[in-house]
Image (spheres, coloured by chain):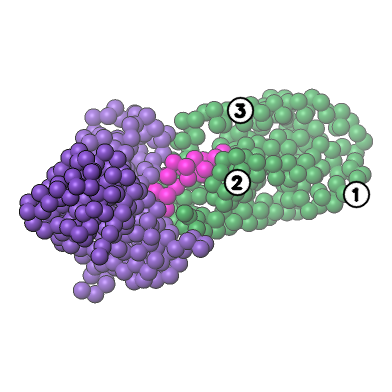
Chain colours: A purple, B green
Amino acid sequence: MPDGDRSIATRALTRRFGDLVAVDAVDLEVAPGEVFGFLGPNGAGKSTLVRMLTTILAPSAGSARVAGHDVVHEAGAVRRAIGVALQEVGLDPLMTARELLTLQARLFDAGRAEAAARAERLLAMVGLDEVPPATRVGTYSGGMKRRLDLALALVHDPRVLFLDEPTTGLDPASRAAIWREVRRLNEEDGVTIFLTTQYLEEADRLADRVAIIDRGRIAALGTPASLKAEVGEEVVELELPDPDAARRAADVLAGLAPRRSLSGARARLYVTGAAALVPEVVRRLDAAGLPLRGLSVTQPTLDDVFLRVTGSGPAGAEAKEATP
Amino acid sequence: MTDILLLVGRALRDVLRQPTAVVPNIAISLFFLFVYNSGLLSVSRLPGFRGSYLGFILPVSIVSAAVGGAGLAGQTLIRDITDGYFTKLLLTPTRRLAVIWGPMVASAVVLTVQVVAVVALALAMGLRIATGPAGFLLVLLLAFLWGMGFAGYAAFVALRTRNAAAAQAATFAFFPLIFLSYTFVPQEYVTAAWLRAAATVNPTTYVFDAMRALLNGGWDTGTVATGLAVTLGFATLTGVLALWAARAATRTAA
């Protein structure tokens, strides 16, 4: 598929801030209609990449096309084709939701009546139509602001929607509402969605494909299932009294499970045929005098993928990875 | 043009929703006019003084009011940047010019309303405008353009610093502009050579001259045209700087 037919295509896209390389020669392709999850620890370069793709930050090197247009030379055409809800909502607290939506629609060239109609439709869609019309946005709760910000991103029926950590800091109900809406936009309206998140569960639920960025580079790319399969078939999770004991346990079991990760007082072993291994795990820990607080066998999650590629949890939790 | 009108309308509506941002400015300019006129009235008794002192000092009140207007434009932009709304506007196809002109034009409109109030007070105090209603409209035009000039400077500082305190501090630059001129007495009575030199290079001097001609003297086309040209040049200069800063914002934003 040529770059022009892709929703997003980057070529060695790079952004430097002084000596820091925030985004380092990233090549990425997102097909129309895809939900693409973009994961990474804080400061890995997620937001910098989104800002470049959405035309509000110029790349230092490389190029990017979004909806078939170059983000630098055809920024206007890109802006018309994309909807953007950044991590920090962008709302004028002195205005009402209807005023903000109508103004936004008119800035995207809708006529007065058309803009008003779209505002009503979007308010209903994000569940803010019951709010008294004169309420200024400054008095909204965090969840309401996030929903309104999403509505603002949709005011011109964009073909590609960028959502930068859309559910960070939201309560479970608001998060579920955003997830429903994202899925509906993708399935019913065919909107391509580029989603950054720190919540791996969110990417697992929503994304067709996932990329993990670490220190500015793409560290892993694939469907959630294929990435999880790379980690191993099963995970044996051991809970020990403290992180030090967990570290010693991981060392003791190195011969049984060459791939392991640590997270606090928990050690995770990536194995095949867990049922047959568990008795031996218990015997060896017993022999080493390490008291086991709990043991469970689970499927790998994107957290495991994340730990493996970035060497730390999504929130920066301590972890250690050992491979033979 | 639509995007500019939409964003000016939005900025004006915001101003009306925060009356505390403008009411003190209007009160201060009325107060200045009153005390300057009462305290310095005797200047008009100096030999060779033409017209009324009220007509002479009124432009000082108007130009001082533009400082408050500029502060308003700067603070609106800082508020938009802090609230993330500035970025939201940059994500629309709207021209960058419209994004910064929204708050700038709104502040100049507020200033123009303020000038109407000050002139109304002056008329009540006995001012007679030498050039009549047409002259009054020209005074408003000069005030509007001068307001755009100050607002452009404030917008430039706001966009470069993104910091409310810095933008506020930058308005101190207006004081030499207002006071290093023939602010309280006509040129003939200023003897300090340094002040005369400063006044000559200070664009405000030409605005004072033009407004004073319209209010006190009569149709002095040369003076009025010079004032308009200087004001337009100043507004263009700071406007270009502000536009450059708005464009640079997308190159450097972290």
Quarter residue A58 falls in: bottom left
Find the distance from the CA under tag 2 to the CA under tag 3: 19 Å
Question: Tag 3's secondary structure?
Answer: helix
Q: Is residue A249 visible?
A: yes
Question: Tag 1's secondary structure?
Answer: helix
Specify whether A203 is left or right of B150.
Answer: left
Percent x, y for residue B68?
62, 37
Q: Read off the residue under disc 3.
A: B24
Percent x, y for residue B156?
58, 51
Magenta residues span B72-92
Q: Is residue B83 magenta?
A: yes
Q: Is residue A127 above or below residue A237?
A: above
Find the distance from the CA under tag 2 to the CA under tag 1: 31 Å
Labels 2, 1: front one: 2
Q: Amino acid at mark 3?
A: Pro
Specify whether B100 is left or right of A276.
Answer: right
Q: Is residue A33 visible?
A: no
Q: Read off the residue under disc 1.
A: B193
For the residue pair A273 and B111, the one nearer the viewer reads as A273
Tell me if mark 3 has few (under 14), some (14-19) or many (20+) residues whose alpha carbon lies within 10 angstroms of its own: few
For the residue pair A269 and A62, the one nearer the viewer reads as A269
The quarter of the rendered structure image containing the C terminus of chain A is bottom left
Q: Chain of mark 2?
A: B
Percent x, y for residue A273?
8, 56
